[in-house]
Amino acid sequence: MNAVPAPAAAPAALPVPVTRHLGRVDYEPTWRAMQRFTDARRADTADEIWFLEHPPVFTLGVNASRAHLLAPGDIPVVQIDRGGQVTYHGPGQLVVYPLIDLKRAGLGIRAFVTALERAVIGLAAAYGISAAGRRSAPGVYVGERKLASIGVRVRRGGAYHGLALNVAMDLEPFGRINPCGYAGLEMTQLAQLGGPAEVGACARALEPHLLRALGF
């Protein structure tokens, strides 16, 4: 008699990342902290997701053209190591940095970016806002206006940087740049579209959408 094979073991669930709500923190020290975390992580290091705001700053991707930086004025400019062109961070914008071991999560870079977009699209839908991604230009859009920007870096298999979701902020500084390298691109934000106007509440609401989109 042939032995009945034992049922296959269910795949182990991914450990849920550590989430940190950091409040308003300066850009450059936070960027350096992401780099240190990524360089020091090991195969068993828990993933982390950081939710925060930054004081006003323009950031330029590693291959960004300064031609897209039109009139920065008194807002500092920082050249960094993510992909993409120029964007703006400031109070009233929710910035999310998922520090994820992509191999362990079973995600390629395109799937990772798409997961970030899906999380924002799901959050927007919860407030009755119809949003979508664009394969040709990463981010989340409502009609022709951009709601969230995405720029990531992968080093030693670990992803860092992430997404910036406009919640209730002064959008004027976006007029000083070509956002994400697109002249005349108009930005929008949740508060203008009937969504929440408080960054902390938005972070708490986005967290389950993000964990689900990333497969946790």
Image: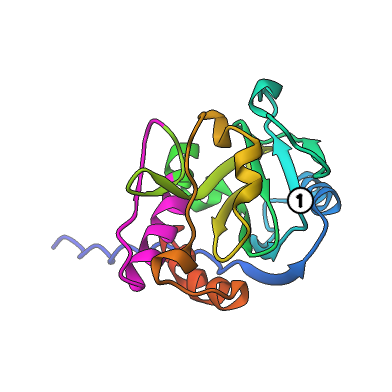
Question: Residue 138 vs residue 125: left or right?
Answer: right
Q: Is residue 123 above or below residue 185?
A: below
At x 52%, y 29%, the residue is 183
Q: Position of residue 147 (x, y in %)?
A: 47, 53
Residue 179 is covered by the magenta coloring: no
Residue 131 is covered by the magenta coloring: yes
Which residue is the extreme one toward the right? Answer: 29
The quadrant of the rendering that contains the N terminus is bottom left
At x 35%, y 72%, the residue is 126
Q: SS for tag 1? A: helix
At x 21%, y 63%, the residue is 3
Front-most of 137 and 98? 137
Q: Amino acid at mark 1?
A: Met
Q: Which residues are magenta?
A: 114-136
Q: Is residue 56 above or below residue 168?
A: above
Q: Residues within 10 Å of mark 1 (few under 14, many from 20)?
A: some
Question: Residue 187 vs residue 49: left or right?
Answer: left
Which residue lies under the disc numbered 1? 34
Q: Could you tell me if residue 153 is visible in this image?
A: no
Q: Position of residue 104 (x, y in %)?
A: 54, 51
